[in-house]
Image (spheres, grey):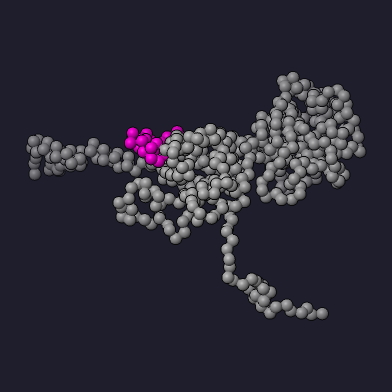
Amino acid sequence: MSLSSESISTVASEANKENVPLKVDIGNLCLQDDDAEEKKKKRKNRRNKKRATGFEEFYCDPPMTPAQYQEEHEVVYPPHRPFVDRIEECIQRFRALRRMDNTQDSIFSAYLLLGGVDSRQRQFQGTSKLNNAALEGYTKAEVRDITADDVIPRGQGATDIRFYNPSSPEHWDVDFTAVASGFLSEHLSGLHSLDTIEYQKGVAVVLNFLKYVVSHDVCPEYADDLRRAQKVCVAALEEAQAIFDLMELLPGTFNLAGNTLWDGTLETDFDPEWAPASKPPFDKEAARTTLLAHGSVLLDNSNSERLQKTLSDPDARIVKGTGCFEVVDIMLPSKAAIAQLEIATECMNQHFKQNLSLEACGRLVVRPTFVRSGWQVTAASGVPVMTTLDGKYTTAKVPEFFLVEREALETFKIGMKMQIHFITLEDGLVNFMSRAENIYQSFYTFLPQELMIRYKEPRLSERPAKSIHDADDGGDGGGDMPFDD
């Protein structure tokens, strides 16, 4: 079979119209339009490209048409519409527009639950199996209402006190900052460690939602509160890493030296089986040299002499204490203090035949405070700092500052709180931090509804009360049995 040039051109034009690859046999010669095949493959790859999740670093919502903008500002979020209706609509639209994975979805639901929004899955009313045919004829807004799980209970019939009810708002306040602070500092940190990807995802979800509320002008009356809540989210990411680093940096070389000399628990608690490649940080001589070097720089002449006498006094007593402190000021060591410490360390090393390398210390100014988490109900929880001398409670002066190395000072943030153990010389000359049990963010907040997360309404039970005659409680149903003599 043979084709003329006119026939080939005719076939080619028809193929281009139908947008199919051209393939013509001329005897044993095969001609194929490779460009059309390549275009087809490109379109297929483009169609399979992943959609944006809405949580990308530089993601922004697509621009709205004039009709959509008018609908949002006149129908969905008008100022005259009640706040409860606006924020409920906003939450449902946000969840519909964001492609959350399982972790993000569960974290966002927990955030809403803590904020008084019922985000529980609807029992026996699941919508996951609804197909397009079942939803045919409904508008997008109606489909969103049908499939939404995030609702704010209304009316007198809504009796679950865990959720905000506009009919009885006397026990609730609209406070985006407080909810963000409580969720990120107490609730989310209890679900996921501060150094995990899940915690970062949780912060990103909350921040993304707050930005969505602002960008769509959902509640302009709370604009300042929303901006403060966004700052809390930014601080959460910064302070999460800072707390993780501080737990490794504290108590520091200076405080370890004081504990080695007067407390001794750090040295006696050391177990080489758990850390065979390491050794206790100090022996007695190295600890004494460290304190003398720092004392010559940080203390004046009279107090430096007092410290030397205390170091040589075998009967010196210490006050042990535990408590919670808030960081109110951070005083970094000056350049002069750093230079003086280098000279003092060199002199001490030569005199005592040591080989120490010390970092300059500054002041961590603190004040006693409370961290009320709602779970502490003992008498001790009402006292911020407790001190003992020779095993007996005492009213010794509460420390006003601790000496800490420069690296740790630069990591601290004003407002952070820490639960620590410490020792103080009996004359109050120097305070030494023994160990940090916990460090809290500067925005730490415990919300009272945290205690109500798993609360269930009491209800009448027709079942009779349990008895000693019940066989299912570990007995045989025979009642009290006499003991054999």
Tell whether position 432 is magenta. no
**Which residue shows up at 62% across the image and 37% down it?**
443
Image quarter of residue 321: top right
Q: Nearer the viewer, residue 175 or 61?
A: 175
Which residue in the rendered view is the most extreme toward the top? Answer: 336
Q: Position of residue 123 (x, y in %)?
A: 47, 59
Left/right of residue 144 with respect to residue 254 in the rendered view:
left
Question: Image quadrant for the N terminus?
Answer: top left
Left/right of residue 99 with respect to residue 187 in the rendered view:
left
**Which residue shows up at 12% across the image and 36% down it?**
9
Does residue 50 sit above or below 157 in this rendering?
above
Does residue 449 sit above or below 309 in this rendering?
below
**Which residue shows up at 30% across the image and 52% down it?**
136
Q: Position of residue 434 (x, y in %)?
A: 77, 39
**Which residue shows up at 20% across the image and 42% down it?**
20
Q: Position of residue 169 (x, y in %)?
A: 55, 46
Q: Which residues are magenta?
A: 58-77
Tell whether position 66 is magenta. yes
Question: Image quadrant for the C terminus?
Answer: bottom right
Residue 110 visible from this viewpoint? no
Q: Nearer the viewer, residue 32 or 411?
A: 411
Q: Nearer the viewer, residue 255 or 320?
A: 320
